Amino acid sequence: MDLDLTGRTIVVTGGTSGIGLATVRVLLGEGARVAFCGRDGERLDRVAADLAAVHGGDRVLARRCDVTSADEVAVFATAVGAWGGGLDALVNNAGQGRVSTFASTTDANWRAELDLKFFSQILPIRAFRPLLEESPVAAIVAVNSLLSYQPEPHMVCTSAARAGVQNLMKSLSVEFAPKIRVNTIVLGLIESGQWDRRFAARSDASVDRDTWFADLARSKHIPAGRLGKAEEVARAIAFLASPAASYVTGASLEVSGGVSRFA
Ligand code: NDP
């Protein structure tokens, strides 16, 4: 199947690590031009240089941008506009989960989490929408979590915010139709920077990486028997972002190794 991504321009937020970086790589491999952002400028420059060495500097645009800042997102959108070539897809991936129970979540934590989860979607969508509307194949892909349907008590505010994002994207898929397709990726547990950080902070430092991740998969009852790889998510994102998914909108694609219990 041809994803028809050659020469398309795609924005990926949070493209310097984990799922976002894997998505940037897959899209570049499919021939797209990719603009991506992150907050850590040093890592951004390093990743951009690596990608440019493999795929050519003319197909890579990296900008420092915190997606919860309207001003920074507007500057990023202006840079993408000035890059030329329009915009064919926006992948809203930037973010991370918050581990906390209702008892341990302060009002400030709630506000920060709702801000991150909602505005990491709202601000880029608002800023990039004019460019997307000029494309005949426009698509938005929101990276979301199974927590939106299967909340975990130890991630109470992330779960609630994720549910709201699912709802928001469904609304946008109707409001933006037929011009822009809007879909979500619903993730289970995926090996990435987030899980690497939790592994690094493990209580028993003598446990090696393979054992720690295998125990995690067992404890979460993942039918596939392991966590997902970032590349496995990236391929699903690339499909939804591509013209190959031309009749798919308002949908959620679950990438979870079968761990969901909601359908
Ligand atoms: P990583 O930590 O590996 O990557 C996160 C990326 O997002 C980095 O590039 C980071 O760069 C960037 N980022 C984070 N916050 C911001 C911000 N405010 N503005 C701009 N960029 C930001 O995590 P994952 O790959 O695991 O996560 C990707 C997405 O998938 C996240 O939204 C996450 O919540 C979601 N997800 C992941 C799951 C998993 O199991 N891995 C499960 C469910 C959902 P920098 O820090 O430099 O800004």
Image: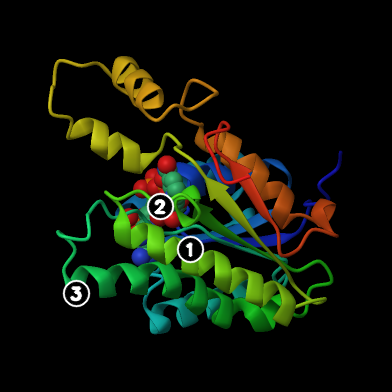
Tell me the residue that label 3 is attached to.
Answer: 107
Report the side of 186 relative to 10 (left or right): left
153 w.r.t. 121: above or below = above
Q: Amino acid at mark 2?
A: Pro
Residue 89 seen by the camera: yes
Q: The C terminus is located in which quarter?
A: top right
Give me the residue at 44% from left, 59% from top.
94
Q: Position of residue 106 (x, y in %)?
A: 16, 69
Q: Residue furthest front?
A: 262
Label 1 environment density (alpha carbons within 10 Å; few <14, some 14–19, many ≥20):
many
Q: Where residue 163 is drawn, which disc sits there? A: 1
Q: Is residue 28 visible?
A: no
Secondary structure beneath dot 3 equals: helix
From the viewer's side, name the closer residue of 33 and 20: 20
Q: Are marks 3 and 2 in contact (CB under 8 Å)?
A: no
Mark found first going from the N terminus, 3 or 2: 3
How much space separates mark 3 and mark 2, taking CA atoms?
Answer: 19 Å
Label 3 Cα crowd, 10 Å radius (few <14 / some 14-19 / many 20+):
few
* Circle 1: residue type: Ala
Q: Secondary structure at mark 2?
A: loop
Q: Which mark is residue 246?
A: none
**Can you give x and y, in whole percent of width and height, for residue 187 in the image?**
52, 45
Disc 2 crowd rating (10 Å Cα; few below 14, some 14-19, many 20+) is some
Proximity of marks 1 and 3: CB atoms separated by less than 8 Å? no
